[in-house]
């Protein structure tokens, strides 16, 4: 059954005139009349009768009209649902995250999100530069970021987790019975500085304490820096997620005074939040709530 013909029939019956209906649906009057004649032949009995006042439904047409309205509403609902599903299938959320966060958080977060929004694709991009997620967000190249707090006005920031800062020391380091490492003790030692502007985390901790570092920038990943410390080539300072699972050959001791790095998620302040982004945020907050209790 042609739904367009039924829509025009309903319009003509409601308006009581072929000429008025033609104006509404954008057909010529003769074209509309021909379409109604075709519909009546298809159904097998008259639906409209014409008189000097215009047109009105026949008894059979009036009897069919409730079912026709129900059919057209169901058809409209179906088309709307098809459109919604099609739009969701083409939706992609672009995420940029530090490699440490991508490794330790994202598998579980994306698992939870996929169960809620299986039709939404996720494009996860790992970055090894402290500022890159914010730069990508600002340029419109990503939709959602996981990073440490930075000063970017374009980011709508949500704090998630405060991770501790640790001194990374060779196994042979004479730490004794101490359970913390004084920041001042870094002075005079070869300090292997994390690469990719993550020196910002280190300097945010040492500069307020007037600690002077004899730093060497290492253009390598975190794991390589840790291995270099393990071979006695210097000391370093990293965060909880940066060292997780890589501590067999080194000592990892919380610094004192105690220091943290604030991790969070961000979206662009001027970009409208989609339903999928909202659902992703809910998955993140649920995960962090459980993660913080471990």
Image (cartoon, rainbow, N blue to C red):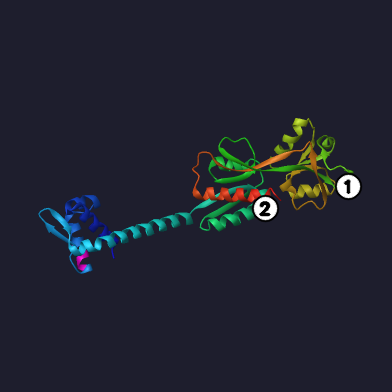
Quadrant of image for the N terminus:
bottom left
**Residue assigned mark 2:** 103
For the view shown, which residue lies furthest in the left direction?
52
Examine the structure image and report whether residue 168 is included in the region drawn in magenta: no
User: Percent from the top left, x then y, of residue 250?
Assistant: 82, 49
Sequence-first tag of 2 and 1: 2
The region drawn magenta spans: 37-41
- Residue 114 x %, y %: 56, 57
Is 132 drawn above or below residue 78 in the view shown? above
Work out whether residue 199 or residue 106 is closer to the camera in this orientation and state it: 106
Q: Around disc 1, counting alpha carbons within 10 Å, would you say few (fewer than 14), some (14 to 19), or many (20 or more)? A: few
> Which residue position is annotated with label 1?
172
Q: Residues within 10 Å of mark 2 (few under 14, many from 20)?
A: some
Residue 142 appears in the rendering: no
What is the CA distance from the residue labelled 2 to the residue labelled 1? 29 Å
Q: Secondary structure at mark 2?
A: helix
């Amino acid at each position: 059954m042609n739904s367009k013909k039924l829509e025009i029939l309903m319009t003509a019956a409601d308006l009581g005139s072929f000429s008025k209906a033609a104006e509404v649906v954008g057909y010529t009057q003769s074209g509309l009349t021909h379409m109604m004649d075709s519909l009546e032949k298809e159904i097998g009995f008259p639906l409209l009768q014409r008189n000097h006042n215009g047109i009105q439904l026949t008894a059979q047409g009036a009897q069919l009209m409730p079912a026709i309205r129900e059919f057209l509403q169901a058809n409209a609902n179906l088309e709307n649902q098809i459109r919604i599903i099609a739009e969701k299938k083409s939706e992609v959320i672009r995420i940029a995250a530090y490699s440490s966060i991508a490794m330790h958080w994202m598998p579980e977060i994306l698992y939870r999100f996929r169960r809620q929004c299986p039709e939404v694709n996720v494009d996860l991009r790992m970055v090894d530069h402290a500022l890159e997620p914010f730069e990508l967000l600002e340029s419109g190249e990503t939709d959602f970021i996981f990073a440490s707090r930075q000063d970017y006005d374009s980011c709508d920031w949500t704090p998630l987790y405060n991770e501790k800062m640790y001194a990374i020391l060779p196994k042979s380091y004479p730490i004794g019975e101490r359970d913390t490492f004084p920041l001042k003790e870094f002075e005079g030692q070869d300090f292997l500085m994390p690469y990719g502007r993550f020196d910002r985390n280190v300097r945010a901790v040492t500069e307020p304490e007037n600690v002077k570092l004899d730093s060497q920038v290492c253009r390598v990943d975190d794991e390589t820096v840790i291995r270099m410390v393990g071979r006695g080539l210097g000391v370093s300072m990293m965060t909880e997620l940066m060292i997780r699972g890589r501590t067999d050959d080194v000592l990892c001791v919380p610094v004192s005074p105690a220091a943290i790095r604030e991790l969070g998620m961000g979206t662009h302040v001027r970009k409208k939040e989609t339903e999928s982004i909202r659902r992703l945020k809910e998955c993140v907050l649920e995960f962090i709530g459980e993660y913080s209790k471990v």
